[in-house]
Image: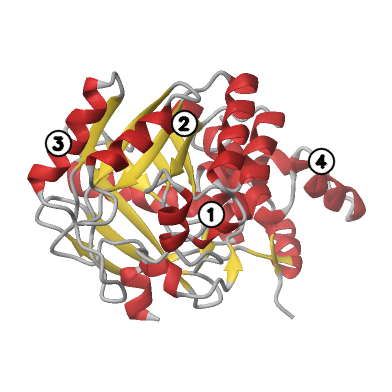
Amino acid sequence: MQKKDIRGLSLEALQDFLKENNQPTFRAKQIYEWLWQKQVQSFDEMTNLPNQFRSLLAEHFAIHKIAVHTKQVSSDRTIKSSFKLFDSRLVEGVLIPTEKRMTACISSQVGCSLDCKFCATGYMKRERNLEPYEIYEQVVAIAEQAQNHYQIPLSNIVFMGMGEPLLNYANVLKAIEKITSPEGLGMSYKRITVSTAGVAKMIMKLADDGFKCNLALSLHAANDEKRSQIMSINDSNKLSVLRDALKYYYAKTKNPLTYEYIVFKDFNDGLEDAEELYRFTKHVPSKVNIIEYNPIEEADYINTDLEKLDKFANYLRDKGVTVKVRRSRGKDIDAACGQLAGKNN
C-alpha cells in the first residue's frame, strides 16, 4: 500500500503522531523545517534527528518529490517544464521572465474538468487534484530555474496552468498558506494571483474566507452566447451570476479584479465586443489584461491582427479602463497551457 506523504499532515496531526509513538512533540517543528524550508528528498537528510527516529518516520511515511520531466527554453527566455509526479502523471509549469518580474505559472490539477475550446488542457480529462505539496514544489522548482538560468529570484506566482484552481479549492489555499508562511517560502500574498474560469459560488467562498491574494477572471467574451461557445462553464455560471459574485467578492475584500481577455480573430475582437467588455468592467474596480493567443492543434482559433488588437485596447482606454496587452510568450516552444504535458502523455 502506498505510504502517505508526510507533508499531507498538519503540524497538529504530526504532533499527535509523535505523542502516539512516545516522541517529543518539538520534533514536529524540526520536521516541518526540513520539509518546507529545506525541501529534503528523504528522511535521511534530516541530520539533526536521531537515526532511530528517522527510521520510524520512513516506516510510516513517504516524501513524494516531483521531478522535471521535460524542459523547453524559448528564445524570449520563457522556460516551460513538465513535472513528473510520484504516480507518473504530468503537469506543467512555466517561468515567465520580464524586465520587472520573474513569474511562475503553475498548475492546480492533472488535466482539467472544464473544456474550454481554445485551451489544450481543456481537451484532456481531469485525472486528479494536485496535493498542496505538489503545488508548492512547482514553485520551488521554477524558483530554482529563475536563479540557475537568470540569477534573479522569483517574484510572482500565477495559478494559470493546468486545471481550475477553484475546483481544487482546499488544496490550493493550503498551498498558498505554505508559500506565504515564514515556515515555507515567505512570499507576499500580493505577489500571488489565482485565475478562475468563473465558478461563482467559489468566488463568494473566497470572499467569506478572507482571501488575500489577487483574483483574475478568464472572461474572453462579455456576452453569454459567445462565452458559452468557447467556455461551457458559462452555461451554469452566466455573466449575471458572475457579476453578482464579483460584486459580493469586492464588497467583502475591497480587492480589485483582473479580467483576462484573449482576442480571437473574427470572434470577439470587434468594437461591439470591446463595448460589452467595458460594460462588464464597470461592476467592480478592475483592470483588463488583453492576451495574445498561442494557437493549439486541437482548435481553429487564431490571434487577431495587430491593428484590430490596438483598436480594441484603445477603445477601452478611451473609456477609462486600465488595459495591459500581454504579448504571447514562448511562441517557439509548447507554451500554450497543456501543450507539453499533452504531448508527453
State the CA–CA distance, disc 4 to disc 3.
Answer: 63 Å
The mark nearer the N terminus, 1 or 4, is 4
Asked if labels 4 and 1 touch by Cβ distance under 8 angstroms, the answer is no
Secondary-structure class at tag 1: helix
Label 3: how many Cα within 10 Å (few below 14, some 14–19, many 20+): some
Residue 42's spot in the image, x, y percent?
56, 62
Amino acid marked by disc 1: Asn
Name the residue tied to disc 1.
234
Q: Is residue 68 visible?
A: no
> Up-down: is 88 above or below 139?
below
Name the residue tied to disc 4.
25
Secondary-structure class at tag 2: loop
Nearest the viewer among 26 and 3 is: 3
State the CA–CA distance, disc 2 to disc 4.
Answer: 27 Å
Instruction: Tell which tag, 2 or 1, sits nearer the viewer.
Output: 1
State the CA–CA distance, disc 1 to disc 4.
Answer: 49 Å
Residue 27's spot in the image, x, y percent?
74, 43
| Residue positioned 45% across, 35% down in the render | 192
| Residue positioned 20% across, 56% down in the render | 265
Name the residue tied to disc 3.
311
Q: How many marks?
A: 4
Instruction: Tell which tag, 2 or 4, sits nearer the viewer.
Output: 2
Asked if labels 1 and 2 touch by Cβ distance under 8 angstroms, the answer is no
- Quadrant containing the C terminus is bottom left
The mark nearer the N terminus, 2 or 1, is 2
Name the residue tied to disc 2.
187
Amino acid marked by disc 3: Lys
> Up-down: is 335 above or below 245?
below
- Quadrant containing the N terminus is bottom right
Amino acid marked by disc 4: Thr
